[in-house]
Amino acid sequence: MGNQVEKLTHLNYKEVPTADPTGMDRDEGPRIGVSYIFSNDDDELEQQQDSVHDLGGENPALQPYDPQLHEVECSVYYRDECIYQKSFSEEDTQLEEGDEGGGGHLSTYTPENLLNRCKPGDLVEFVCQAQYPHWVVYVGDFQVVHLHRLEVVNSFLTDASQGRRGRIANQLYRYKPLSPAAVVRNALEQVGCKDRDLSWRNSECFAAWCRYGKREFKIGGELRIGKQPYRLQIRLGDKRSHTLEFQSLEDLIMEKRRNDQIGRAAVIQELSSHLQAAE
């Protein structure tokens, strides 16, 4: 079939093919992903969803949340190096539980419980069914810094959670972290930054940049020159997986977050339908 753009359904942004500009075709290997031009970050989409709930819709935050039922297991590779992994397998959990801070453990906790677990410099991921994950940087004194609705703000952790459960997410990305003091400093220095002055598409990119300091998390941090060194490997169960390729980490994170928002069952159905059509 050669290089063909993965046809997925997205809202509020335009799809831009990322095929090799040389026109070279390959008959093997993973399928390529897509690049996106976004008009705003996904927290603004979250705000629209909140408005629907306020009008009487069912609030997913009130429903029982099971990470293994709703979340998508995946790995992210830069060339051959694994730079991110979310896995519920016992082997991966055992490896990560020994890490300082326990960030690799995918169990979720109430905001009040997290206050007893967090240390300055920790990343926290708040999760809820049918919503984008919301990432924050814990800076101490029960407070966090996070990108929320196109502005970097300083909030109490319990307020930033909006009632969602969360986890310490230090171990999801496998980059070498900065010192806790540097992470906190990075976060606090950006408080008040908003709108066109922002350098991050979403809360995850902002929080990860604070902890790892890598320009790849920033808007336009990587040149798109036709090559696709990033791979998103999505686990479908029964030892099956599906791989997408991307030109930049920013594009890949946006696709990964979309999968988190629609949920595991929808992702598996979407990919299964596509693979059957391709056959």
Image (tube, helix red, strand yellow):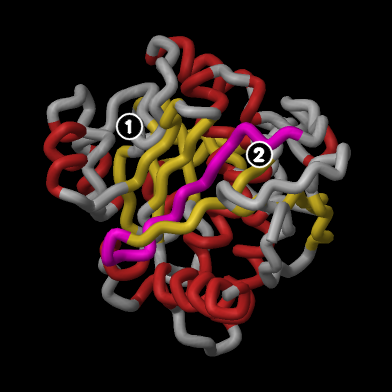
Q: Position of residue 70 (x, y in %)?
A: 35, 68
Q: Is residue 163 visible?
A: no
Image mark count:
2
- Where the N terminus falls, by quadrant? bottom right
Give the side of residue 252 with respect to residue 36, left or right. left
Q: Is 177 inside the magenta-drawn segment?
A: no
Q: Nearer the viewer, residue 146 or 90?
A: 90
Quadrant into which the C terminus falls: bottom right
Residue type for callout 1: Gln
Q: Is residue 37 above or below residue 8?
A: above
The image shows residue 118 at horizontal and vertical percentages of: 27, 32
Could you say where residue 80 lies in the image, as x and y percent from the top left?
47, 28
- Element type at marker 2? helix
The answer to whether residue 237 is magenta is yes
Magenta stretch mostly in which secondary structure? strand
Q: Taking 256 as reference, is 151 above or below it?
A: above
x 31%, y 65%: residue: 237
Residue 190: image quadrant is top right
Crowd around label 1: few <14 · some 14–19 · many ≥20 (10 Å): many
Disc 2 packing (10 Å; few <14; some 14–19; many ≥20): many
261 or 22: which is nearer to us?
22
**Residue at the spot x=57%, y=47% of the render?**
29
Residue that badge 1 annotates: 171
- Judge whether residue 78 can be spotted in this image: yes
Q: In screen coordinates, is 49 left or right of 25?
A: left
Residue pointed to by mark 2: 250
Q: Residue furthest bottom?
A: 56
Q: Along the polypeptide, which appears first: circle 2 or circle 1? A: 1
Q: Nearer the viewer, residue 68 or 233?
A: 233
Q: Amino acid at mark 2?
A: Glu
Residue name at image x 81 percent, y 53 percent:
17
The residues colored magenta run 227-239
